[in-house]
Image (spheres, rainbow, N blue to C red):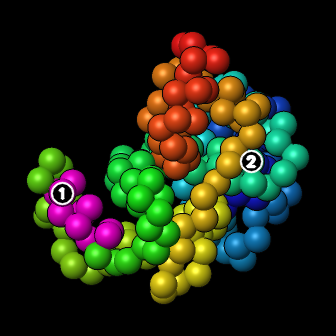
Amino acid sequence: MPIESKLMAVLWMRFKDWKMVQQEALEHHHFPQKSLKGQKRVMSEVRFRLQHLRPAEIELLVEQEGMTEVRLLVHLAACRAYPLLLSFSSKVLREKLMVFDEEVQDADFYNHWEEQAVLHDSLYRLGETSRSQIRRAVYRFLAEVGVLIGGPPRTLNPVHPPNSLVQGIDGSPRPWLEALLLDEATIEMFLQENPV
């Protein structure tokens, strides 16, 4: 939901209050969902992700002209909100790119899930239906932000964030640069040029 995310970021910059953002969005029908319940559900999800960005990053999101940059910032927010998405992006997708393997199989997701379930008991307790729904949601999200193309087979689409976007990442940027699928040499170059 990159368009909805940018819209909510613009409203947040204006009001600095999430209740006011929701009220404004509902009053002016900023979201395409027909039912009030659907609009509130989408706003809640977008808000949850955006709350994982720092104020300077939300401002950066608002300033972006191109959808590629908006999508990458939404991806960053979602990776901060959902540790499974962060680890799948940085550990599985990024590593596949490093060995020039651009095809993403369901087995890649399920193998990663099993590795993470050892560390996080809550994943282990989820049933097959929930796991399948989460897999589909992860793939749909990654396609929407431009990291995956097609499906199946799904193909990785290496992203090349502009330097201005990378410089706008607040705090310790390494995990977030990995989530954007940047290779080690690019990350090291950026960290040397922009020490934290």
Q: Look at mark 2 in the image and give the residue it sits on.
A: 69
> Who is closer to the viewer here, 20 or 6?
6
Q: Position of residue 32 (x, y in %)?
A: 76, 71
Q: Amino acid at mark 2?
A: Glu
Q: Is residue 15 shown left or right of residue 145?
A: right
172 shown above or below 94: above
Q: Amino acid at mark 1?
A: Glu
> Who is closer to the viewer here, 71 or 7?
71
The residue sitting at the top extreme is: 195
The quarter of the displayed image where residue 193 is located = top right
Q: Give the main secondary structure of the magenta stretch.
A: helix
Q: Position of residue 44 (x, y in %)?
A: 56, 53
**Residue in the image at 47% along x and 63% along y:** 100
Crowd tier of the residue under label 2, counting other residues whose Cα lies within 10 Å: few below 14, some 14–19, many 20 or above: many
**Residue in the image at 52% along x and 35% along y:** 185
Label 1: element kind? helix
Q: Which mark is residue 115?
A: 1
Quadrant of the image for the N terminus?
bottom right
Quadrant of the image for the C terminus?
top right
Q: Position of residue 167 (x, y in %)?
A: 68, 26
Label 2: element kind? helix
Which range of residues does the magenta coloring cover? 108-117
**Residue in the image at 41% along x and 59% along y:** 99
The residue sitting at the bottom extreme is: 152
> Who is closer to the viewer here, 186 or 5?
186
Q: Which mark is residue 82?
A: none
Residue 37 in view of the camera = no
